[in-house]
Image (cartoon, rainbow, N blue to C red):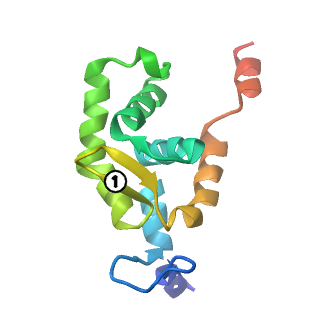
Amino acid sequence: MTAMMFEPLVTMAAGAVESADVVALTLNAMFGLLGVPRRRYVLYHLFDERGVLTIDDIARHVAARERGVPPDAVSEEDHQRVVVSLVHNHLPRLAEHGIVDYDSRSGDVVLSYNADFVEPHVESARACECPSATEEVERRG
C-alpha cells in the first residue's frame, strides 16, 4: 500500500505532448508542497484570481494573510520579505512540480498543468484553515 504513495498522480496533462517539461506529481510531493502555509496562500490567491498575476501582487496578498491585515495595510518590509521567499523558494518549488509557471524577469505567475490535480486538496486545506465570513463574525460575537 505504501508503494502507491510514490506512484505519479499525474504523468501528463490532458492532451499534452509527452516531453521533458511535463513532470509527474507524486502524492508525497503534493502534500509536501501543500504542507507549507505560504505556498498554500499563494495557491489560494492564484485559484481565486484565475489569471496571470504578478509576484508583487501575490506577495502582498500572502503577507496580508500572514499578518491578518488587508493587502493595502502590508508594510513594504513585510512585502519585500515575502517577495524574496517567493522568488527564491516557493515559486521555484511549485514550478518544479508543474503547479505554476512564473517568469522571474517579468514577475508574471500563472497556474500550470498540474494545478487542476492539486486544486481539490488546496480547497480542502482552505476550508479547514479559513472560516467563512459568517463563522468569523459569529466567533467574534
Q: Residue at x 62, y 36 (%)?
A: 130
Quadrant position of residue 21 = bottom left
Q: Residue at x 49, y 67 (%)?
A: 113
Q: Residue at x 40, y 76 (%)?
A: 23
Task: Locate residue 64, reporting x and y percent.
Answer: 45, 26
111 left or right of 60 in image: right
Q: Is residue 35 something that shows in the picture?
A: no
Task: Locate residue 125, reporting x and y percent.
Answer: 60, 49
**Amino acid marked by disc 1:** Tyr
Q: Quadrant of the C terminus?
A: top right
Answer above or below: position of 137 versus 111: above
Q: Quadrant of the N terminus?
A: bottom right
Q: Nearer the viewer, residue 50 or 3?
A: 50
Answer above or below: position of 5 versus 77: below
Quadrant position of residue 38 = top left
The number of numbered badges drawn on the structure is 1
Task: Locate residue 45, reporting x and y percent.
Answer: 52, 41
Q: Nearer the viewer, residue 102 or 69?
A: 102
134 left or right of 60 in image: right
Task: Locate residue 56, reporting x and y percent.
Answer: 34, 34
**Mark 1 sits on what residue?**
102
Answer above or below: position of 78 versus 51: above
| Element assignment for label 1 | strand
110 left or right of 139 in image: left
Q: Is residue 53 something that shows in the picture?
A: yes
Quadrant position of residue 132 = top right
Badge 1 local density, few (<14 within 10 Å), some, or many (20+)?
Answer: many
